[in-house]
Image (cartoon, helix red, strand yellow):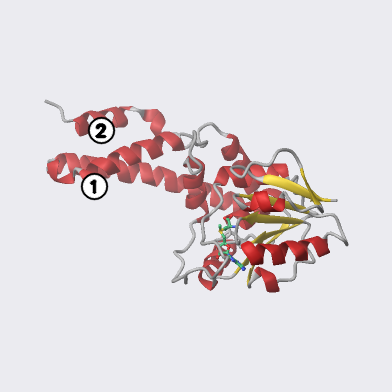
Amino acid sequence: MDSPLQTLLDDLLQDRSLRDPDQLRRRIDALEQLESWLFNRGDTLTPSLRERGEALTAELEAINDRLYQTIRDAIRHGNGADILRTWAASPHSVADQESYGPLDTLIAGVLDFKEPGDVPEPGADMVFYQPTPARDIFDFIERASITSRDVMMDLGAGLGHVTLLTAICTGARCIGIELQPAYVASARQCAGELQIRHAQFIEQDVRQADLSEGTVFYLYTPFTGGILREVLDVLKRESKDRAIRVCTLGPCTAIVANEPWLKADGACDARRTTLFRSL
Ligand SMILES: C[S@@+](CC[C@H](N)C(=O)[O-])C[C@H]1O[C@@H](n2cnc3c(N)ncnc32)[C@H](O)[C@@H]1O
């Protein structure tokens, strides 16, 4: 009698559409199923089934790697915006309910960050690193109507997903400010490899940073309490000289919504990005 893995392998091998580069989401599902067999139930498999499972895994991963390389080449040639926006809008890459999904896998493959070195525990009122889900980054780019005349500053940039994707998709000068040297090193290396010259990373505490060039500021709740208060006061002073937009995601949205010098563009929802404009 056929084992369930054998049936799965037969189905996947016969399904030629799985080799279509666009079918990333289905390949990710297939790879997850294969991984669950090979790693969780590996001792129950015959050597030949294991070999077939590993070969198919390698084949599907190679298709994904070629897809990522194609997009990396397009970015290096200055053609990354269209291809990334198309993927962001594609039903093949959208997660159903979860915040992270196939689009995040694609972006991780494309940006291919070097594993950061040791990162110390965050200080008081500082939030540990977690990247903005890719769908929210594209949502931010649309919502904030960023153009090449803007200067976008990501306050607490982590590995730099927001800075890099905004630079690629809009042509705006994008500056990521991040306290942790290990994240900054990985972000700079990625920008260098993809030749994104208008993405820049500054290793600094946001409280000490010069925010005078920014027209759009992004905060994925990088800090809370006194630090958030201090930075909002700096932004308020900056807004006296020029109109600025502030985009937030997560719990800091509720605090920013109470700033009388900012007005939300639409409803505030901590689960999605919210855009605020200075008055
Ligand atoms: C929630 S993560 C957001 C990362 C990135 N903005 C994104 O959306 O993908 C918050 C980041 O802020 C950084 N951070 C926290 N406090 C900071 C500070 N005072 N100055 C600079 N960076 C800070 C953390 O190290 C962390 O990488």
Q: Amino acid at mark 2?
A: Leu
In the rendered image, which quarter contains the N terminus?
top left
Whether residues under marks 1 and 2 lie with C-beta atoms below 8 angstroms apart, the answer is no
Residue 93 pos. (x, y %): 51, 37
In the rendered image of this protein, does residue 31 appear above or below residue 260? above
Disc 1 within 8 angstroms of ligand 1 (CB):
no
x, y percent for residue 222: 60, 60
Q: Which mark is residue 39?
A: 1
Q: From the viewer's perspective, is 149 left or right of 83?
A: right
Specify the quadrant of the image occupied by residue 223.
Answer: bottom right
- Image quarter for ligand 1 equals bottom right
The image shows residue 62 at horizontal and vertical percentages of 38, 46
Note whether ligand 1 is within 8 Å of mark 2.
no
Callout 1: 10 Å neighbours few (<14), some, many (20+)?
few
The residue nearer to you, when weighing 116 against 190, is: 116
The amino acid pointed to by label 1 is Phe
Label 2: few (<14), some (14–19) or many (≥20) C-alpha neighbours in 10 Å:
some
Work out whether residue 142 or residue 273 is closer to the camera in this orientation and state it: 273
From this viewpoint, is residue 235 visible?
Answer: yes
Instruction: Name which of mark 1 and mark 2 comes first in the sequence.
Output: 2
Q: Nearer the viewer, residue 142 or 255?
A: 255
Name the residue tied to disc 2.
9
x 47%, y 51%: residue: 109
Q: Residue at x 61, y 61 (%)?
A: 224
Q: CA distance from mark 1 to mark 2?
A: 15 Å
Left or right, 126 with respect to 148, comes to: left
Q: Mark 1 falls on what kind of element? A: helix
> Where's residue 88, x and y in %?
58, 39
User: Residue drawn 51% across and 60% down?
Assistant: 129
Q: Is residue 248 visible?
A: no
In this rendering, position of residue 133 left or right of residue 207:
left
Dot label at residue 106: none
